[in-house]
Structures are given as structure tokens and as C-alpha cells.
């Protein structure tokens, strides 16, 4: 069953717009936003949701037409244009807002490390700009950072709840995926399979390193990098300062961090704990504020630390907006 078919019962009676409005209305209501006072935001979210389902349908049809089978339950973290009309329906589409990250336009000769690469959008983008790229992802589902005492089974339940919230699958599909799949199979569906598929179609030479962020020094050996990119990674680490301390010696040039720092006052350097107090809470733990990042990065040997802008977009298919601070730290 194709990705978008989980919405058929609603689409049949209300169309895609009806499905979209249901999702947006629920999101705005649950997040304290008055629907009547958020017209422009709602319109933007609706357009994004409709675009997502259009891409999902188009991708499924095009992939089958090109003979690519077995992709029905792959999770596409990034929207990636693979050429010939084949575009992955990612939850994040960074294509129109790449300028916000302030990456060098010409990366010829640069050695780049992309940590938390997922489907690989940024790794492939760096390669397109001329860089030699190492893409890093955790070795298995079991290697997601877990709260002390939390089991792998609880991590999988968190993952399943996240997929339920995203509404990418019907309840029956989701149960089939999570109840009948091994950890290795889940890892293939959600992380490695999508990357490997894109890597093959793009004829990419990006290398893949399987490592927890805390083990990078051991797994990468003596390599150092001109640019290290950390996109939405540190929020998923129990020990973000330790993670940064591991990354710092690997960088001989610039570290670029994309991180949610909203809602945390910059009156003094601090980190806000967002992991909650229940076993079923998700895998997001800390939000360091901007002053915390600035001070820690300088302490780790980065002389020039600057907030260069924000990456703002829509998280699909929920239609929720996001705002990531972009931080550049140079040695």
C-alpha cells in the first residue's frame, strides 16, 4: 500500500484540502493558536500539506514506473530531487531555503563531515558543491540516546508514537511495521534504506560512517574536517556538551549548527530540559540557548562564534512551523 493511501477514507469524502484542514486545525488547536487569528499561517500550512501529499503520490507512481519497488514504508526525512522527476516526499524540504545556512557556494577541495545525516540531503548537497563528504548516522535503532533506565523497546514505542503523530501510515500499517519488524528492519526503513536508495540513484561518492556521536574520534581515526555540520542532532543527545567536546577536535575549520533555541531566554547561558517526566516522552532532551552555545564553543577552541540567521519552514505533513538558529563557529 502506498504512503498516501492511509488518507483515502478522508480524501474520498473531503478531498486533500479536507484532510489538510483537519490536520492543521488540530495542530493549531493543540498548540494554543487561535485558528481565526492565524489565517496566513494556516494557508501556508495547508499549501505545504497539499504539496507533501502531491509529492508522496507522485514519488510512489514515478518510483514504480522506473522499476523501484519495496519503498512503500520508507521514511523520507528529507526532500531530495533525484532527477528524472523522482523527488522524495520528505518531512523537511530545505531546497528553497539553503541560503539561510550560509554554506560556501564552492566547496571544491573541502573535507566535510555531516553528522546525523539521515536521508542525506545535506551530504549530497555538499558533494554537489565539490566537497569530499563523510555522512554519519547511528549504527542501529538501539543506539539512539536513551534516558537512564529506558529500554530499547521504549525507544521503539516512542518512534511508533512519533509516526502516529505524523499520520504517515494507517493504524494497521503502523502496527504491521513496528510489531513485525526487527530492529535491523526498522533501521533500514527509517534511516539507512532511504539514504542508500538516494546514494545509488545519485551515483554518489559520499562515504557513510556508522557511529554514535560520542564515538566519532575512535571510528574516524585521525581525520579532521574543514567543515562539520550538525543539523538537528544535539537536541537528541542526553549529553550535548560531551557531544560537542568530541566534535571540536575533528574540525580544523568551521562547525555549523542548526538548532532550535526558541523559547529559552538569553539572559544567561543555560540549557532547558524538555524530556518530560514520563517514560513515553520522546527523544528530545535539551535546548541550549544561544549564549550557552557561544560560551561552550569558545571554551572548546572556536574563536569566532556567530549567529548567522534562521532557517524557517514547515514540518510536513503536520503543517507545523519550525525555526532553527544557524550558528557558525570557526577556529
Image (spheres, rainbow, N blue to C red):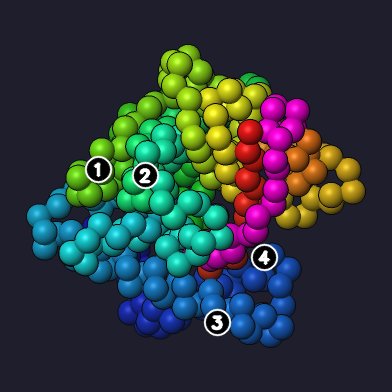
Query: Which residue does the image show at 18% across and 59% down from the upper left?
Result: 63
Report crowding for label 1: few under 14, some 14 to 19, many 20 or more residues within 10 A (C-alpha): some
Pointer 2 residue = 108
Q: Which mark is residue 117?
A: none
How many angstroms separate mark 2 from mark 4 (CA)? 46 Å
Report crowding for label 3: few under 14, some 14 to 19, many 20 or more residues within 10 A (C-alpha): some
Mark 3 and mark 1 residues within 8 Å of each other at the beta carbon:
no
Q: Earlier along the polypeptide chain: callout 4 or callout 1?
A: 4
Pointer 3 residue = 43
Question: Mark 2 falls on what kind of element?
Answer: loop
Compared to residue 114, the image places residue 145 above or below, namely above
Question: Mark 4 falls on what kind of element?
Answer: helix
Q: Is residue 305 magenta?
A: yes
Mark 4 and mark 1 residues within 8 Å of each other at the beta carbon:
no
Left or right: 185 as drawn, with respect to 233: left
How many angstroms separate mark 3 from mark 2 (CA)? 40 Å
- Of 282 and 55, the residue lying toward us: 55
Pointer 1 residue = 204
Report crowding for label 2: few under 14, some 14 to 19, many 20 or more residues within 10 A (C-alpha): some
Report crowding for label 4: few under 14, some 14 to 19, many 20 or more residues within 10 A (C-alpha): few
Left or right: 29 as drawn, with respect to 252: right
Query: Which residue does the image show at 41% across and 46% down from the upper left?
Result: 107
Q: Which mark is residue 30?
A: 4
Compared to residue 279, the image places residue 107 above or below, namely below
Query: Which residue does the image show at 61% across and 83% down from the upper left?
Result: 40
Q: Earlier along the polypeptide chain: callout 2 or callout 4?
A: 4
Where is residue 44 drawn, in percent x and y?
54, 78
Amino acid at each position: 500500500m502506498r504512503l498516501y493511501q492511509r488518507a483515502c477514507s478522508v480524501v474520498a469524502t473531503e478531498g486533500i484540502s479536507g484532510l489538510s484542514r483537519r490536520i492543521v486545525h488540530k495542530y493549531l488547536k493543540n498548540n494554543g493558536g487561535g485558528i481565526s487569528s492565524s489565517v496566513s499561517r494556516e494557508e501556508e500550512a495547508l499549501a505545504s500539506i497539499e504539496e507533501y501529499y502531491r509529492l508522496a503520490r507522485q514519488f510512489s507512481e514515478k518510483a514504480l514506473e522506473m522499476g523501484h519497488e519495496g519503498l512503500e514504508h520508507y521514511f523520507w526525512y528529507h526532500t531530495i530531487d533525484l532527477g528524472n522527476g523522482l523527488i522524495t516526499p520528505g518531512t523537511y524540504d530545505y531546497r528553497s531555503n539553503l541560503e539561510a545556512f550560509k554554506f560556501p557556494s564552492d566547496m571544491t577541495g573541502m573535507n566535510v563531515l555531516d553528522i546525523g545525516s539521515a536521508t542525506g540531503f545535506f551530504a549530497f548537497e555538499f558533494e554537489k558543491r565539490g566537497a569530499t563528504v563523510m555522512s554519519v548516522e547511528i549504527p542501529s535503532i538501539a543506539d539512539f540516546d536513551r534516558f537512564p533506565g529506558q529500554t530499547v523497546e521504549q525507544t521503539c514505542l516512542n518512534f511508533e508514537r512519533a509516526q502516529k503523530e505524523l499520520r504517515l501510515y494507517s493504524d494497521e500499517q503502523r502496527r504491521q511495521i513496528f510489531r513485525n519488524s526487527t530492529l535491523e528492519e526498522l533501521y533500514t526503513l527509517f534511516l539507512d534504506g532511504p539514504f542508500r536508495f538516494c546514494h545509488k540513484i545519485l551515483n554518489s561518492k559520499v562515504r557513510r560512517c556508522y557511529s554514535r556521536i560520542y564515538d566519532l574520534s575512535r571510528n574516524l581515526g585521525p581525520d579532521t574536517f574543514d567543515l562539520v555540520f550538525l543539523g538537528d542532532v544535539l537536541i537528541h543527545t542526553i549529553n550535548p556538551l560531551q557531544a560537542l567536546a568530541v566534535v571540536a577536535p575533528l574540525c580544523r575549520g568551521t562547525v555549523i549548527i542548526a538548532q532550535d533555541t526558541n523559547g529559552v531566554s538569553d539572559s544567561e547561558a543555560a540549557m532547558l530540559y524538555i524530556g518530560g517526566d514520563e517514560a513515553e516522552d520522546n527523544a528530545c532532551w535539551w535546548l541550549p540557548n544561544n549564549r550557552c552555545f557561544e560560551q561552550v564553543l569558545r571554551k572548546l577552541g572556536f574563536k569566532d562564534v556567530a549567529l548567522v540567521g534562521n532557517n524557517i519552514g514547515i514540518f510536513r505533513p503536520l503543517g507545523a512551523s519550525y525555526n532553527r538558529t544557524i550558528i557558525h563557529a570557526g577556529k
